[in-house]
Amino acid sequence: MFDRRAEREALAADQLASLRYLCGELVKGNDYYGPILKDAGLGDGVESIEDFVGKCPFTTKGEIVADQERHGPFGRNQTYALDRYTRFHQTSGTTANPMRWLDTEESWGWMVGNWQRVYKGAGVGRGDRVFFAFSFGPFLGFWTAFEAAEGLGCLCLPGGGMSSEARLKMMAECKANVLCCTPTYAMRLADVGAGSGIDVAGIGVKVVVVAGEPGGSVKAVRERISEAWGGARVYDHHGMTEVGPVSYECQKMSGILRLMERGYLVEVVDQENGEAVEDGEVGELVLTTLGRVASPLLRYRTGDLVKVLAEDRDEGEVADVGLEGGILGRADDMLLVRGVNVFPSAVDEIVMGVGGVAEYRVEVEERDAMVEMKVTVEPCEDRVGDDGLRSEVEGALRGALSLRVPVEVVEVGALPRFEMKANRWVRC
């Protein structure tokens, strides 16, 4: 019989052993973290996880970016000599200067192993044909996903440098049964298929693994993707270039992301005071990368807002902590509109839950220190000319948020489509 308490105790013991090794290596060879650990009183070792959390300061993205600017091009956060590093990646730099990240063969192998946990949670393995519907660039997730599938014995089909229609044709001809992309692009591919006469539902995709946006854990978005792809099961996960693959979705609890705690020391803290929040409360996810010794992050404030399950009853007998609703949004994306906290994931759920919305955009404007928002929606073909769509969306937003949000309906094709992360929120 599965004993969750005993499993959690064993997990904590493994984390402490990994943490002690990590900090020992950093004190010896990492010019960035070595001095920080010594100054925090951790230079001679870590007594306990509580000791580490109580003494080690947070790391922020701004601090890492500043270090790389002063000590370019890679900064000082390498634990070993540079000739041991074989992989280079960098963040998108959408909210700040991009961060560059180096990995040794060992740290890269650790991340690939984490990605394989994502696939195993989705039931993907040897014999599956996995199509990667994105262009390969310096962003880490593409490469780890590809190599993880290869390592599991999957047939890997790269879709870089192709149009959406060409990708669909290749998927159909090669009989791909697993699709990897963002939630938005999964829906976009379905729209392209409908417009070009390709039966997307008939391709034979059984699993869609999504990431990059909160939509993967949003019920309305998941249902729409599943329906478009002939009943395929949608699995969410998330990660970051600077920390690697972080979470997976297990088959027993749809819409719940589980954090890979043997690879990460996990904290959820109050955004304002940095203190731990209770399970069931929204806080900022803080991660320490236990296995990425060559280029680690200690107590890294990810900016992701999450809520740990207050009561975990996973039937799949999983010890890893679960996140209700996945990643709720980014700390810097949450809006306070007339006294109401508004998360992008909540708006995604509301708007996409209204039948007949093909795409949408949110315009945010600050007027006299007050934040206002407006939603523009593009109708599906079967709702063109339907005067009731605007009132349906307005009513759904008002009912869920207790806010009156103006809605405008535009013509088909008026709003942009996205292959990578969707940029639906526009600040005016």
Image (cartoon, rainbow, N blue to C red):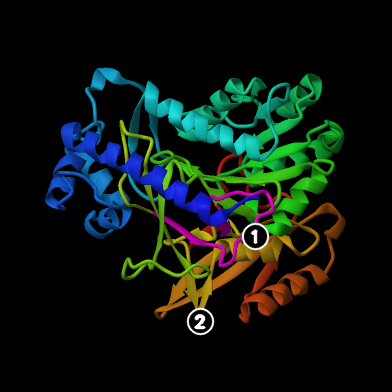
Per the image, the residue denoted by label 2 is 338
Left or right of 262? Residue 97 is left
User: Callout 2, which amino acid?
Assistant: Arg
Look at the picture and state if 401 lies above or below 188: below
Look at the picture and state if 46 lies above or below 364: above
Q: In the picture, residue 190 is in which quadrant?
A: top right
Left or right of 117? Residue 272 is left
Look at the picture and state if 240 lies above or below 335: above
Nearest to viewer (mark 2 / mark 1)? 1
User: Callout 1, which amino acid?
Assistant: Arg
Where residue 313 is drawn, which disc sits there?
1
- Residue at screen point 51% across, 59% down: 329
- Residue at screen point 49% across, 82% down: 339
Inter-mark Cα distance, 2 to 1: 37 Å
Q: Give the extent of the magenta segment.
A: 302-323
Is 314 a magenta residue? yes
Of the pair 136 and 205, the residue shown nearer to us: 205
Q: In the picture, residue 391 is in which quadrant?
A: bottom right
**Where is residue 289 drawn, in percent x and y?**
37, 42
Left or right of 215? Residue 24 is left
- Residue at screen point 45% across, 70% down: 278
Where residue 397 is drawn, which disc sits there?
none
Taking the view exactly as shown, the residue that stands out farthest to the front is 1
**Where is residue 349 drawn, in percent x and y?**
67, 62
Q: Main secondary structure of the magenta part?
A: loop
